[in-house]
Image (cartoon, rainbow, N blue to C red):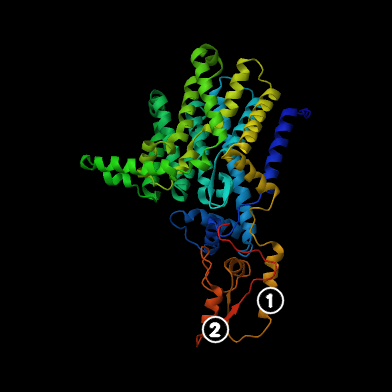
Amino acid sequence: MKQQPFKYDKEQFVHFGILTVVVLLICLSQPFLRYPYDMYYHLITIDQLQDSIHIPNGRLIWHYIWAKIFNLLSILPNEIFLRAKIIHVVQTLISFFTLFYFSKVAIRNIFKTIDKNRLFYLSLWSTLTWFVIFATFSVKYHMVWILWYSVNYQITLPLFWYILALSLQLFWEHPSHKKKFFYVIQIIILSRFILQAHSMEYMYYLMHLFVFMFFYIKEIIVFFKRYFYIVIPSIIAIVYMIKKYQPDHSKFFNYLSLDKLPKLIALIKFDGSHLVGGFNRAGAMFNELMVTILVMIVVCGIFLFFQRDKCSKILELKKSFYFVATAMFIFIPLNIYSAGIFSVITHVFVVNRLFYSSSIFLFLPVMVYAFLTLKNKASIQYINITILGILLSVLIFSKYDYRHNFYNNVKSIYSSVFTTKYNFHLNDQQIKEIGDIIQKIESKQYQKPILYYARADIIFVIKYIYRKPVFSYNRRANPDYIQKHEEAKQQKGLTFIPILIEIPKGFPPLNMYH
């Protein structure tokens, strides 16, 4: 058989090049490692599970998996910052490609027809919007979601979007039986992981399915009847996992009686008022791009009302309305009653995370493409220039707006890729200097083991990089180590030699959580 000549596909080559640039930027970005934020708890816990042979309960499943991966790759515990970098890059890549996959599934179902080239760019813009639109602030730092949680078990958030995409494909795209089985297996396995690692994201999944059922109840009944042999075992498996792996106990179940209904309503109002008063973190989370997209949705809704015939030629209206409804999840933490209800279902201190359940990030590229299509100007150049122009305009406006939230979102990504702002505040040379001090101390002959006393960040380096015994290390505390060292020296019968490491010249001051 004559071999077919190689065909150069310019579009695929460009797509590959764009994705390669994105991957390289992710690989160049640095994890957030300012001391002693929560990523240190996770890195230390992975260290502690290094030799564990039993799969742990609860959220430790995430730490256990990474501990086994590092064992397999022979990445030693003292390479703790390398471990952080690997987790950050891998989980950021997972986030990018799962959101890209979800965006492709959503957008190709919103529009009645769309070619692969335009679908690629719209999905890419949707994914990039997700990366820059969700953020929060803590103590000193305002950063996008991925920088707060790249070294964290909340990788469950992008995985939720992935299983939602698989679920939508099952209902909307009629895949083959083999693909259906493959999708269902993935949904079950990832559901199990999400429920055990961080179950709140599974609530987002159920919220989206509930809205889906509102729009597609008839179709769901038909689907259940046709594929009962897949659906029933899947539901049983998921219900079992929800019951077994749900770690958080909701206050809601304490009020399931008519006589307690007034107390429940009062609790909802009480928690809701506190959330709207500031506990929802809307001051940092709600930003100028969200407002822009919401205004665009309203304008498009008005246009749709008067031009329904034109819009129905390019849009699947029911599917579009489903995504608009789920985009409105952005308002849950902003309303006293909705915020209060979810505070009772979950916890008042996590309701702010419901911002992350919103599909609002889809709508910038979707509405731009729909508008340009109606105007017969939906070329790739027009699409990209228009979306980029909107983002740059919002960015410039945000820079001079009194909140600067969207500007700070983008700035945090820039800082992660092009600066060392988020690195551990002791550099490589300073870490090596600590090692030299230890080596000099241990070159002397001591008859007892040494116990090191030092400032909290230096103690971290001594314990987790140089693997030496230290005085009562606690990542959240910075005790008066000098006084503790003096007290130890005065004690009799010690089984160790207390050694004080003074702060070397030129080391930066330690401001906890800064």
Point out residue 197 in the picture as x, y percentages from the top left corner.
47, 50
Please identify the quarter of the rendering in which residue 505 is found. Answer: bottom right
The reply to whether discs 1 and 2 touch (Cβ–Cβ < 8 Å) is no
Point out residue 106 in the picture as x, y percentages from the top left corner.
54, 29
**Mark 1 neighbour class, 10 Å CA radius: few under 14, some 14 to 19, many 20 or more:** few
User: What quarter of the picture does the C terminus occupy?
Assistant: bottom right
- Which residue shows up at 50% across the image and 45% down it? 156
Left or right, 488 with respect to 445, comes to: left
Seen in the picture, residue 455 relative to 98 is either above or below; the reply is below
Considering depth in this image, is 240 or 437 the residue closer to the camera? 437
* Mark 1 lies on residue: 439
Seen in the picture, residue 365 relative to 148 is either above or below; the reply is above
Seen in the picture, residue 306 relative to 388 is either above or below; the reply is above
For the question of whether residue 316 can be seen, the reply is no
Considering depth in this image, is 71 or 425 the residue closer to the camera? 425
User: Secondary structure beneath disc 1?
Assistant: helix
Which amino acid does the dot numbered 1 rest on? Gln
Chain-order first, disc 1 or disc 2: 1
Seen in the picture, residue 402 relative to 66 is either above or below; the reply is above
Please identify the quarter of the rendering in which residue 377 is found. Answer: top right
> Residue lying furthest left in this view?
259
Q: Nearer the viewer, mark 1 or mark 2?
A: 2
- Which residue shows up at 61% across the image and 31% down it? 123
For the question of whether residue 179 can be seen, the reply is yes
Left or right, 163 with respect to 14, comes to: left
Left or right, 381 with respect to 88, comes to: right
User: What quarter of the picture does the N terminus occupy?
Assistant: top right
* Mark 2 lies on residue: 489
Which amino acid does the dot numbered 2 rest on? Lys
- Which residue shows up at 56% across the image and 22% down it? 111
